[in-house]
Each structure stands twice: as structure tokens, then as C-alpha cells.
Image (cartoon, rainbow, N blue to C red):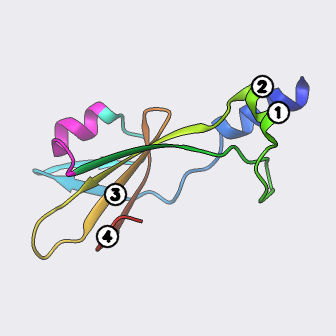
Amino acid sequence: MALIMLLWLMLLWAPSAHAETLRCNGRATEVGDSRLKVLTACGEPKLKDSFCAPVYAAHGLQPVPAPIAGLVAPCLQVDEWLYDRGPGHLMATVRFQYGRVQSITYGTSPP
């Protein structure tokens, strides 16, 4: 039981990607902001995606085995919103975990 609690706490406190900022309509959103703040600043995204990412053990590349992961959380809910910022600007993908911005990445197409 202690191992399960430790894994859960490590997931909650896992470091996020380096801070990026997304500017929309003169407002900035950044890592840690809520979905509501992003929606208010940037409006509806062009596309939304939602998926369950596998749960990984700390310092390992292998997913936690299903029977153990199922006791804690079968997967980690991840939402991605894609913003088309117009001609001359790269697309921005905002990734949410636990309802907060986990990362903002830029590119010509979704990651």
C-alpha cells in the first residue's frame, strides 16, 4: 500500500516541461493555468483531443503493470487543445493534466 501511495504522490508532483507562454488577444497563458483561463484568453481551440496516457513508475521507462496501476489509476487523463494562430505563426498545442496546463508546444502540426 505504501508503494501505491508513493507512486501516486510522485505522479502528482512530477515536474512539468519548461514553462512556455501562449499569447492570445493580448493575454498570456502559461504552465499551471486552468482550462477556464486558457479558454477565456484564447477562445475555442481548432481541435481538441483527449486520451488516457499509461502510468509509469518513477525513474523507469516501463508502464506500471495493469493490475497495480488499476489500484491507483488505470491511466492518466490528458487533454490537448490545438490553436491555429493564423498565417505566419506556428500552431500551438496546449496539454492539460489534472485540469491545468502541463505544457505548451509549437509546431507546424500536432505532436
Query: Under tag 2, what secondary structure?
Result: helix
Of callouts 4 and 2, the N-terminal one? 2
The residue at which mark 3 appears reads as: 93
Residue 77 locus on image (x, y percent): 52, 37
- Give the spatial CA distance, label 1 vs label 3: 32 Å
Q: Residue 36 carries which label?
A: none
Do the CB atoms of the residues marked 4 and 2 lie less than 8 Å apart?
no
Badge 1 amino acid: Pro
Do the CB atoms of the residues marked 3 and 4 lie less than 8 Å apart?
no
Residue 70 locus on image (x, y percent): 74, 29
Of callouts 4 and 1, the N-terminal one? 1
- Which is in the foreground here, disc 3 or disc 2? 2
Q: Spot the residue most to the front.
A: 66
- Which is in the foreground here, disc 3 or disc 4? 4
Residue under the image location 26 percent in, 50 percent down: 47
Q: Spot the residue most to the right.
A: 2
Magenta-highlighted residues: 36-46
Badge 2 amino acid: Leu
The residue at which mark 4 appears reads as: 109
Residue under the image location 83 percent in, 33 percent down: 68
Residue under the image location 64 percent in, 35 percent down: 12
The residue at which mark 1 appears reads as: 67
Is residue 89 a member of the stretch shown in magenta?
no
Residue under the image location 37 percent in, 39 percent down: 33
Name the image quarter holding the C terminus.
bottom left
Residue 17 locus on image (x, y percent): 52, 57
- Give the spatial CA distance, label 1 vs label 2: 7 Å
Badge 3 amino acid: Thr
